[in-house]
Image (cartoon, rainbow, N blue to C red):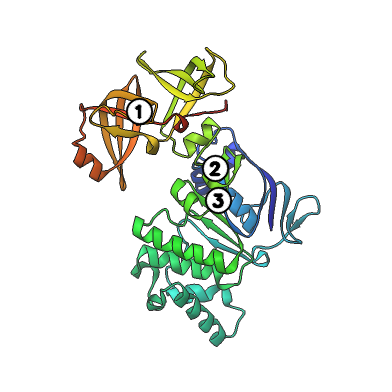
């Protein structure tokens, strides 16, 4: 078990004077405070949040690359850092495997030599055998003699993972390891990471702002916001059904609207919420009955993936929310297409490219948006 309870303040002068820190602490005009407390069991713990929220600083503190001003970091029974006892183990003694966002492979060394580097205390033959075995395990032994610039991004990522595991670490720190890869390479590396997790069962801290990566890999998620953890739990819960507005926005919930409770009905088990658009237009939607009272102001969230589109008004369906609208814009985003529909407020639906073609979707086309009452969630006040 990895236990982390740390606090570190980065002042305005320090942030502005360090280019690397500026990159990791965006907008820290008056300083930045990292103040987190969590435990990470063996398995993948996701550190999820926007750029500059403190995720990378947490990894650096655990690895010994940054020194907190207060707190304690331990693995099992061993203390890595304790401000009260003035304990701070050197980086090498912490036995941490670290994969940086930009990999940080030595450009002048071959893939094999990169993996051998952490094994300098071993005899040459043993060092080489272990490095080759790791490259083979990650299916990149064919690149052992090549320099980093001569291999693909996916191969370089596997070499970086092999190097991180070479010294038999007791925890693994991964800082947005897939950010520079295409979708196919990402899926391959995710399969490798799942295999590592099954075989080694190390505490793995995985930094990302990709909801898909968090859901595919994570066993637990910590949601970071401005240096603090604002939500924690299973990724499918904290990201799939967020209860706070800030977390919903971080998780990529596209439809978030302000409104008021217009009507409550105990008989139907529903409430009617009037949503207000920026231009003064509005629409009404049905949501599950809750504790809120009539005329109370609320914020509701609906995932774009829960919104269906129809080119004819649907009939004979169980979904209670069927709204007529007109396509405002269409945006390509990877394998998905986001369709913005004006219907009192500006809704977003996520559909496949095939659906766009088959339905003849285009700006200006009249459509109906459809979603169930239980797709609507009332968010807590931040």
Q: Which SS class for mark 3?
A: strand
Q: Earlier in the sequence, mark 2 or mark 1?
A: 2
Residue matched to label 2: 237
Taking 65 as reference, is 287 left or right?
left
Cα separation between marks 2 and 1: 23 Å
Question: Which residue occupies 42% across, 53% down?
Answer: 179
Q: Are marks 3 and 2 in contact (CB under 8 Å)?
A: no
Q: Viewer-proximal residue, 225 or 238?
A: 238
Q: Is residue 210 visible?
A: no
Question: Which residue occupies 23% across, 40% down?
Answer: 356
Q: Is residue 99 above or below residue 119?
A: above
User: Which of the 4 image quadrants contains residue 108?
Assistant: bottom left
Disc assigned to residue 347: 1
Residue matched to label 3: 46
Quadrant, the C terminus: top right
Q: Would you call the spot at circle 3 few (<14 residues within 10 Å), some (14-19), or many (20 or more)?
A: many
Q: Earlier in the sequence, mark 1 or mark 3?
A: 3
Q: Would you call the spot at circle 2 few (<14 residues within 10 Å), some (14-19), or many (20 or more)?
A: some
């Amino acid at each position: 078990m990895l236990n982390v309870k740390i606090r570190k303040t980065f002042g305005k002068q320090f942030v502005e004077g360090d280019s690397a820190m500026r990159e990791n602490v965006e907008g820290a005009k008056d300083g930045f405070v990292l103040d987190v407390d969590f435990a990470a069991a063996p398995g993948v713990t996701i550190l999820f949040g926007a750029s500059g929220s403190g995720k990378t600083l947490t990894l650096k503190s655990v690895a010994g690359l940054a020194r907190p001003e207060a707190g304690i970091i331990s693995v099992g029974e061993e203390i890595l850092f304790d401000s009260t006892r003035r304990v701070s183990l050197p980086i090498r003694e912490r036995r941490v495997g670290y994969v940086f966002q930009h990999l940080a492979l030595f450009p002048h060394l071959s893939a094999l030599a990169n993996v051998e580097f952490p094994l300098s205390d071993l005899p040459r033959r043993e060092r080489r055998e272990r490095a080759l075995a790791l490259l083979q395990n990650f299916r990149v032994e064919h690149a052992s003699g090549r320099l980093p610039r001569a291999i693909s991004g996916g191969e370089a990522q596997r070499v970086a993972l092999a190097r991180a595991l070479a010294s038999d670490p007791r925890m693994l720190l991964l800082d947005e390891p897939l950010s520079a890869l295409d979708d196919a390479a990402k899926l391959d590396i995710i399969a490798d990471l799942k295999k590592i997790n099954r075989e080694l069962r190390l505490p793995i801290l995985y930094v990302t702002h990709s909801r898909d990566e968090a859901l595919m890999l994570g066993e637990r998620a910590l949601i970071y916001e401005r240096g603090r953890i604002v939500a924690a739990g299973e990724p499918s819960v904290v990201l799939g059904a967020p209860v706070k507005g800030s977390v919903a926005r971080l998780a990529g919930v596209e439809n978030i609207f302000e409104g008021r409770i217009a009507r409550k009905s105990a008989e139907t088990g529903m409430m009617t919420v009037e949503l207000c658009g920026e231009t003064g237009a509005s629409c009404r939607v049905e949501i599950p009955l809750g504790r809120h009272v009539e005329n109370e102001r609320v914020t509701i969230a609906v995932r774009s993936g829960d919104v269906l589109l129809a080119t004819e008004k649907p009939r004979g369906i169980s979904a209670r929310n069927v709204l007529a609208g007109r396509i405002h814009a269409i945006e390509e985003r990877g394998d998905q297409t986001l369709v913005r529909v004006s219907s009192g407020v500006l809704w977003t639906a996520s559909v496949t490219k095939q659906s766009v073609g088959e339905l003849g979707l285009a700006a200006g086309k009249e459509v109906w948006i459809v979603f169930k009452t239980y797709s609507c969630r009332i968010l807590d006040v931040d």
